[in-house]
Each structure stands twice: as structure tokens, then as C-alpha cells.
Amino acid sequence: MLMTNTAHYTVVFDEQKLALFESGIRPFLDENWPVVAYQNKQKLSLPDGANVLFWLGDSDLYELIPFASEHNWNVGFLPHPDMNRFYRTFPISKKIEESLADIQSAEEPVLSDLLFCNDRLVLGSVMLGHPSMMRPASNIDNSLWSKLKYLTLMSLSLSKTSLLPFKLTTEKGATVNTAALGITIVYRPSGSDFTKKVIGETEQDKASLNTIILAPRSISEVVRFFFSRLFPNKEGAQALANYIGHIKTKTIHISGQCELPYTVDAVAYTAETVDVVVKPNSLKVLSKRLPIKEQVKELKESVSVSSLPKGQAVKELIERPLPWIHHIDQDEVKETFVNLKENSQVSQSYLVLMVLSTLLATVGLFANSAPVIIGAMILAPLMAPIISLSMGVLRQNIDLISSSLKTLSIGMILALGFGILLSLITPLQEINSEIGARLSPTILDLAVAIISGIAAAYANARSEVAKSLAGVAIAVALVPPLAVSAIGIAWLSWSTFSGAFLLFITNLFGIVLAAALTFLVMGFSPFHLAKKGVAYALGFVLIVSIPLSFAFAKLVDRQNIVSSLEGWHVGGVELQDVTIRSQKPLYISVTLLSDHDIDTQHIDKVKKEIESRLQREVRLESKMAILR
């Protein structure tokens, strides 16, 4: 038996679990304390201000806690096997010895707030919205199995789900008209794992409720929400996602266009309106484990809903199922579209920069100077009409496509013309490393173009990252391949022209496809409008990918040959500096390193060993090096 203080308590126990009470609880109680079996709250004839200990499950506590508040009882809670929701609001110990010690150490009861929804006590959370989508979220079981079950239930409902209209009014009269998938209301953020993630845990209680509004505009945003529930961030609350709103107030009134389905601690109800209110200092609790109550003269109301649907967007979202991709605000679409329309036009600055960047790139190529070529990449204005073209393709806008193609064609003609002119007056006709690097594009170059196209589209759609466009221009070379093509024409070299022009076409098609898809994902066009243009762009990319794939296979073959021969020893001779001159026929240049003279017979032996190792005929160009 525990040591007792001078206070006396009346213990109200669960009559249905009498045997468990007698064996597990009564031995710890003072023998002088009255013990009452609970049957009905009206039969509890205890005086106002009494000290009462409850050993009851959730279902009885929903009834008795408001009753205890009305009668001004000083209440302590003993851990009961059917307490589940209760622990969300009252964090008492689950061990009888510790809970009794906590109760008896409390010199004064703590005034605790209570949350009510339509006059029903709330121990965990209130949820409104689609039952099939929101009810699983009220499950406080955080096991992986529970989360997977929750994900499955929500996934099955996605394709037919549309948002519901809600009107929310706060205590101070702030009104929010929006469309939402669901709403969660809790007193303490830890009342549900979702709100704990969104808001974060608080060290002090406030006489206010937290309303979290989940309003995804697309299935992709719902998927993001799924994963945030399955794999919550362990670092605590982060900035609100753009599909989540948060209201902090003392009371909230919610209405819709019809009866609202809602749950109180996972029990389902319906009503025309839902009123949730915090009643401050309603219950006297005998415990030192409750969070400290923050004392404020007046609660500051907080309404963070700027990113939620409003106006015309609400009507669109409630009338049809969620789209796969969120269509961004029309004002933002218009602003970006106007900018791209301007970029698609031929201007004096475009013509000047096109000529200067071509001349600079051509000089850099002949000088074999990478820094000069990089400067030409930054100057080149070709990215602007290409991104405009991608938007035109996406939205099937003939005017934008036409103006972009016109500007792009003029730029190409200027690049080829001035490149040819400079190449004709330059006496150099040698393929150096910078020119040669642009003659054999592979699938890797297409990957660079695709990644750069994504970055360029994103930078054009987000003004705050537009400064990154210079980096995109460096990443994907547009003018240098055109300059090499011009050099090939001036030299009358088909291989030089075709290899470099294939690289330019690869960059062009890769950027158009990637940028169009990026704009699509960002919501600049509905899929039904975009699918035709995206299909054409994808078709061109697939056609270009055929020679790129063959070139990539040749590149892999070259590297395999070099790695298999480099450092190989044949009859006391080591092969070094292996270089592939050509692959059809296979022409290999190699340095033969030995500590003695190498005659023709040694060279023939090396050649035969190489052919045997590679299983193909080889033309061998060898240089001898004597090691002493």
C-alpha cells in the first residue's frame, strides 16, 4: 500500500472489470478511501468540490469528465486498460504506482481546458471531409501496418475524389471560404500524429484549438501528403505545405453546402454545421504531469490560409474529380506566357548577341580554348526561343510555335553564315580537341539536354531562380555545335557537319521535350491539351536517340578495348597509351614499353595476341619505348 497524505479520495471504478480492480488496483489504495462502482453518472451523489479518482475506460470518461467539470470535482485518473484516446489529452502514467504518487504529490489541482464538438467531449481530434479519406487518419495507431492500410484506403478513393466546400468562421469573425479534402481539429498538436508533424509539439498549453485544412489541388499533391503520413519528418514541424492551411483560435464554426460528415475521436456523425470550442479552465486535474498553461491576457488569433483555394478555384475543384496535376493560378500562367511570348520575338539584341556569340565560339574552337567557348555559351540567346517553343508545343499555341521557330531559324542561319565566313578566312583546318568533342554525340548528351531543359523551364516559371539561366546555358551548348557545323561546311567535311549538327538537334529536341514536361507538371496546361504536343516532341527525341544510342555503344566499346589493353603484358612487353583511331576497321595506336629492343617479330606477336584477346582483326600502330 502507498503512503497517503491527509487528503481523502473517492475512487470510482469500472464495475465491468471488478475482478481486475480487486487484484490490480485496490491493493494500492488507502483502505479508508470510499470505493464506488460506476453505473450511471446520475447515481454519483458526490458533493461539489470532492476529490475523485476515476479508474474507467474512454467510453465512460466521455460521459463523466464533463459531469465532473459541472460539479467542480478535483479529478485524478488511474490507468485503465480501456484508456486509449484519453492519453492524448491527459498524459498520465500508465503505471498505477506512478499515477497515485503523481496524484498525491499535487498540492493544488491543475486547471485544464476541454475541447467540445457540437457539445461532445473531444479527447483526440475532430475530422471533417470524405469519410473514406479522412477516417483512417483518425487512427492513432502508428504502426507500419496501420499506415499502409491508411495509404491503401485513400489510394482506392483518389480517382473519384473531388474537394468539398467549407466555410470556416473563427471566434473573432474571420471567414475562410475554401475547398478541402478534409479538416482536422485538435486542442494540443500532439492530439494526432498528422497535426504534430504539421504544427510541431508545444511545451505550453493555450486555451485555443488548432484547425488544419488539407486542400490538395491535384492527385500528385495528395500523393505527397500520403508519403508525409507514411514517412513523417523526424526533425519536427516544417513550413506549411502549399496545400495545407492552419487556423489557431478559441472557437471555429464550420458549414458547407449540405450535411457535413465528421468524426469525433473516430466516431462518425453528420450535421449541417460543426461548432468546435475550447472551454478554458473547465476541469480540475490532480496531476503534475500536464503541460504548463501559458497565461495570456488575450489570445492572439492566427489564420494562415493564403495558399488555399479561393474564388473561382473553389468552384472548379468541387465540381469535378481532382486532376493529376495542379493547374496553377491563371494570373501566374498569363505572366509566364507573356514573358515567353516576348522571348519568342526577333529583337535587335537577339540578332547582335547571336552574331557575337557565334564569332566568339568559332574563335574559341579554332584556338582550342574552353574559357572562350564558355563565354560564347553565356552570350548565346538561343535558349529563350527554345523554351518559348516548348510552351507553344505544350499548349498547342500556333502563334507561339510560329514566332519561336522563326526566331530560332534566324538564329541558326546567322550562326551558320557567320561561322562559315570566319572559317573561310581562317587558315586553320585541323580538328583539335574542342572541335572533336562535338563530333560524336551520344545518349549522354541527350541526358544533359533533358536535365538542362527542366532547369531552364523551372527558371523561366520562377522569377526568383531566373539568375540560374546562365548556368543552364553553360551546361547545354547550343551555339558551339552550330559553329562546328559551320566549320564543317566551310571545310566541305560532311562528317564534321553531320556530327556537330546532330549534337545541336539533340540539344534542341531534348530541351523542348523536357521543358514542355516541366511546364506540364507545374500546371501550365491540362493534360488533354498537352498530350498531342508532348507526343510529337517525344517522337522526335526517340528518332534522334537511335544514332545517339549507336554512338554510345561505340563509346562503351572503345572504353572496353582501352581498359582491356592498357597495362597488359605480352611476352615481356607492356602496352601503354592505348588509343582507338577508328573502329571500322579497328585501328589501335599503342606504345610498347620494354627493357630490350623490340623487333618486327615482337610487334607481330603483340598484334596477334591483341586480335586473340579482342576476337577481331586489328590494324596496329605502335611506338616503342625502352625502359632502362
Image (cartoon, rainbow, N blue to C red):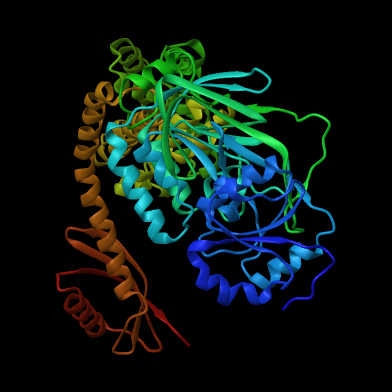
- Image height check: is 154 above or below 402? below
Q: Which residue is drawn at 21% across and 83% down?
A: 605
Which of the pair 146/308 is nearer the observer? 146
Name which quarter of the figure residue 611 lies in.
bottom left
- Image height check: is 383 above or below 619? above
- 232 vs 609, left or right, is right
Tell me if residue 421 can be seen: no
Name which quarter of the figure residue 518 lies in.
top left
Q: Give residue 154's position: percent from left, percent from top.
A: 34, 43
Q: Give residue 78's position: percent from left, percent from top.
A: 64, 63
- Image height check: is 333 above or below 206? above
Q: Which residue is drawn at 21% across and 45% down?
A: 547
Tell me if residue 34 can be seen: yes
Q: Which residue is drawn at 21% across and 81% down?
A: 609
Locate the N terminus by quadrant: bottom right
Q: Give residue 199's position: percent from left, percent from top.
A: 62, 42
The mark tally for this picture is 0
Which of the pair 360/206 is nearer the observer? 206
- 240 vs 29, left or right, is left
Q: Give residue 17's position: percent from left, percent from top.
A: 50, 66
Name which quarter of the figure residue 365 lies in.
top left
